Amino acid sequence: MSKKGKEVKKIKRKFGDRKDGRLIRDLDAMHIVLPYIYPRRCDNEAFITEQIDLTNINKYLEEINKDEKEFKYTIFHLISAALVKIVAQRPQLNRFVQNGRTYQRNELSLGFVIKKQFKDSASEGLAFMRFDGTNTVKDLHERFKKEITSTRSGKEDASTEGLKFVSNLPRFIVRWATQFLNFLDKYGKMPKSLADVDMNYVSVFISNLGSIKLNSAYHHLTNRGTNSLFVVIGAKKKVPFYDDEGNVTMRECLDIGMTVDERIADGYYFSKSIRLLNKLLAEPELLELPALEEIDYE
């Protein structure tokens, strides 16, 4: 049976905590030592790929979009809502390793790139959204509507404005400033005003390659920042499915690729998280429940 979700409660900061995360103090010996053996995030990447059957998702989208004329629900919105629900219920996915220590992030956030127009010359904008345990797919849809509409209207997001300012500075200043910020990043002293608009500090970074007709692919993590989960959504395609008797049917599917920092959890934890993802996308109506409302998926 499901349990009613509650909003994530803030935990009082203790010595050793960062302003963006709580130090995990009860790790097993292996996960304490691993960050010292393999200190860089890019040295600890694990790549997971899943094929998603879109049969039920397409039916759900057809139903939910009957009364939605202005900004229709898409597969991207449903997958994003599923990721919010998974990270809310599987909190180890919202951890990060920095300076040899493992932290539980204080908030749940998504980041993604918005192509302002589907033209070679069109610029890109960056979207950074935060969520809590009360969010549903309908809440997320409204957030996407505001963010994407604003970006495509020509309004610059804070990340792009900051990058434009920095790009006009002399190169030696950019180099010095970057090294200084990396130092602050290492010790958890990055100014909040900068971290709040930097995609390298989100819980989940999503790249919707399907929107530009590309297949899902591996994408690296970065040593800068705290992002430990990068998700790539591929283009839709027809795939043969076989039943136990060898009969074949063609179904519309897409691939999802996930690059994770394997230091934040073990293989069993990742496996259960993927099972929850498959459950949510096989029964997308579950996304109408608050993110922290638990469901049976074993």
Image (cartoon, helix red, strand yellow):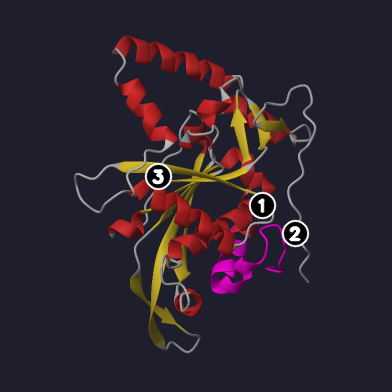
> How far from the left and from the top, in percent, is residue 159?
42, 33
Check the picture and name the quadrant holding the C terminus.
bottom right
Left or right: residue 38 compared with residue 219: right
Whether residues under marks 2 and 1 lie with C-beta atoms below 8 angstroms apart, the answer is: yes
Q: Any magenta on residue 232?
A: no
> Residue 209, position in %: x, y?
35, 55
Secondary structure under the numbered disc 2 in the rendered image: loop
- Indicate the amino acid at tag 3: His
Of 258 and 127, nearer the camera is 127
Identity of the amino acid at label 1?
Ala
Cα–Cα gap, marks 3 and 2: 32 Å
Report the residue at 41% width, 52% height from top.
148
Q: Earlier in the sequence, mark 3 or mark 1?
A: 1
Q: Which residue is mark 3?
A: 219
Q: Which residues are magenta?
A: 274-298
- Is residue 274 found left or right of 59 in the rendered image? right
Q: Which residue is mark 1?
A: 88
Between residue 32 and residue 90, name the one nearer to us: 90
Q: Quadrant of residue 193?
A: top right
